[in-house]
Amino acid sequence: MNDLLCRAPIGMFDSGVGGISVLREAVRQLPHERFIFFGDTKNAPYGTKTREEVLALSRAVVETLLQKGCKAIVIACNTATSAAAAALRAEYEDIPIIAMEPALKPASLLHRDGVVLALATPGTIAGEKYAHLYALYGDGVASLPCGGLMEFAERGELDSPALRAYLSDLFRPYAGQKVEAVVLGCTHYVFLKRAIGRFFPGTPLIDGNEGTVRQLGRRLAEKNLLAPEDQAGDVTLLSSGGEEPVRLMERLLALPNE
Ligand code: DGL
């Protein structure tokens, strides 16, 4: 029974393609696992919806993934974590639910006398979870709600004049300041790393993907749910938006992590 459960897939979801950056890391760290990734493209973006809307959407996706027999769920989305992780954990007590948060904690270690820029969706920044994190690690942090930024990744537009113009407006207030770190607090932004990094040469851009996947490994190990080493891992990509987003997900999954 337990062997069968260990071989079951891990369900992972995001509002769209951003969570593929988490999946890429998960495949690297946990090569024997089978993953089912669901991008809720039809309902994206989550980051400009109310908490209640995001909770309802997230719940529906989790139901879909559990119907496919998933042994654990990864919320590969900071916005859905903020809106829904606590409620979903209470509703699905028996299923390990791994979630993520903007990497303010590791970024705070780099703070001296400059500024740390934290980029996330408006929903994440307005949420209670972020307020809590900020109270602990927000010293020197400027929070930048980035409505409209995830859409570039959703279009597969990872570098373009329009993206550069968006970022240039976003970062203008910090020109001339010492930026010590940039937190990529939305999984979509990881795919925009190169374009963002160009504004801050030599500055660390920090995302929470590695830590989230390490946490996934720990939770599976604790519950004796790690896939056996004789299992060849694989990935199934699904989207509520049809085939086109799945093609983009495939392309993004194949990109090297820079
Ligand atoms: N990828 C999501 C996150 O990590 C949010 C994108 C959105 O739907 O607004 O926050």
Image (tube, rainbow, N blue to C red):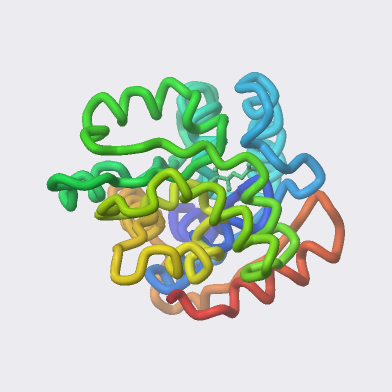
The answer, for residue 253, to whether it is visible in the render is yes
Residue occupying image coordinates x 23% and y 34%: 137
Q: Position of residue 108 (x, y in %)?
A: 21, 44
- In the figure, is residue 43 to the left or right of 225? right
Count of numbered marks = 0
Image quarter for ligand 1: top right
Regarding residue 224, the answer to whether it shows in the image is: no
Q: Residue furthest left?
A: 112
Q: Residue at x 34, y 57 (%)?
A: 206
Residue name at image x 65 percent, y 29 percent: 54
Q: Nearer the viewer, residue 143 or 7?
A: 143
Q: Nearer the viewer, residue 191 or 167?
A: 167
The part of the image, by quadrant, that contains residue 77 is: top right
Is residue 235 shown left or right of residue 256? right
Q: Is residue 147 above or below residue 25?
A: above
Q: Is residue 183 above or below residue 129?
A: below
Residue that appears at 39% across and 29% down: 130
